[in-house]
Amino acid sequence: MVIDTEIELLRFVTAGSVDDGKSTLIGRMLYDKKSIFEDQLEAIKKTSQQRGNDYIDLSLLTDGLKAEREQGITIDVAYRYFSTNKRKFIIADTPGHIQYTRNMITGASNANLIVILIDATKGITEQTRRHAFIASLLQIAHVVVCINKMDLVNFSNDVFENISNDFRTLASKLELKDIHYVPVSALRGDNVVDKSENMQWYNGATLMYVLETIHISSDSNHIDCRFPVQYVIRPQTAEHANYRGYAGRIASGVFKEGDIVKILPSGLTSKIKTIDIWQDEIKSVKEAFPPMSVTVTLEDDIDVSRGNMLVRENNLPNVATEFDAMICWMNEQPLVPGKKYFLKHTTNQTLAMIMEVVYIVDVASYHRNEEQRQVRMNDIGRLRIKTSQPVFLIATVKNKITGSFILIDEHSNDIVAAGMII
């Protein structure tokens, strides 16, 4: 496999209850890594003084909305970009209020890693359980549990160990795999970027060190070849008069020049002629793998269009019009069984109907409520769905990209739910 020599990109999301310090943690990280512009820093200092604070309120870096600054909370998802000499980062700072759970899911949907903050003075809360459940549902590969505000519990090792053990018990009920525990004080900077002198008992890594060194290159599925076609490219120029390419992003697997592929749903087969990428000019490569965006040309002139999927003929996904999925309802209007919605799965869109609400998950206990049939905003549950066109079924646990979908209201075009194929 070709090794990418560029600096690796890590997408991570912060989650936690209200006032656990998510925005302050990100602000501290950017501040200590000197990733803040001088005019930004001056503006934050000025606002902090106006509020009567005797410290720089670093949470103001990510709380961009006027309502957020007035209330001192995060409402929308705030994205920030920074880099070190080891890695590039895209941070999604998500809200902690229950009513903004849908925003948290939006921020977490593309993350390699989730940082779950827990207030050392409160321990695990319902939102901790909710966010851990969502991380498991979305198949986020890496989890860092930051036990924050350690300065308010006198940097106690016992508090850290007790909360860590409580989370381990919680995680044992979920599909959370790679979990790290870090005691921090976002306000003071302990164990965020620099090692804390106040917690000599902690021999582990700082949060920044974990983010810079955690292994993510094997997170993608390199076995099941899945290439959703996003766009058909026909330049129709003198130079490329007969060019017909199929553009998209590799979802999983490794595609090579000369591979025999099957096009779904037609079932026709062909051979990959070229795999083209754009680097100042069109350039062909011998192979492509996630998350590369490429244009594939085929030896045969066959009908391929947006929403089709290229796969290996000896490794096919299940194709069905009826399946079960876990969803998080994201709309103020409750789900209506029997109503038609648009289901968008990779680059394919089809009409879908909710046939049955199998159960709703009680996030506080992780118990299944099979009596509740109404699905309201922020509810998480299992549904049985029927579609008008075949859907290529790949369980989310095997492929995060092709295992997920969204439901769209056919009248308002609002996204009403995020779903994960079981």
Image (tube, rainbow, N blue to C red):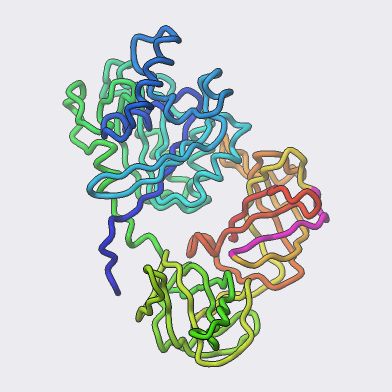
Q: Is residue 176 left or right of residue 209?
A: right
Give the x, y percent position of residue 217: 32, 60
Give the x, y percent position of residue 216: 33, 56
Q: Quadrant of residue 334?
A: top right
Q: Quadrant of residue 378?
A: top right
Q: Nearer the viewer, residue 127 or 274?
A: 274
Q: Nearer the viewer, residue 40 or 247?
A: 40
Q: Is residue 340 found inside the magenta-colored segment of the image? A: yes
Query: Farthest bottom residue?
Result: 300
Please provide the residue range marked out in magenta.
336-346
Location of the C terminus (image quadrant): bottom right
Q: How many marks?
A: 0
Q: Is residue 248 found inside the magenta-colored segment of the image? A: no
Residue at x-position 63% and y-position 46%? 328
Q: Tell me if residue 229 comes above or below residue 356 in the rendering.
A: below
Location of the N terminus (image quadrant): bottom left
Residue at x-position 57% and y-position 73%? 229
Residue at x-position 56% and y-position 41%? 366
Q: Quadrant of residue 152?
A: top left
Q: Nearer the viewer, residue 321 or 297?
A: 297
Give the x, y percent position of residue 172: 43, 45
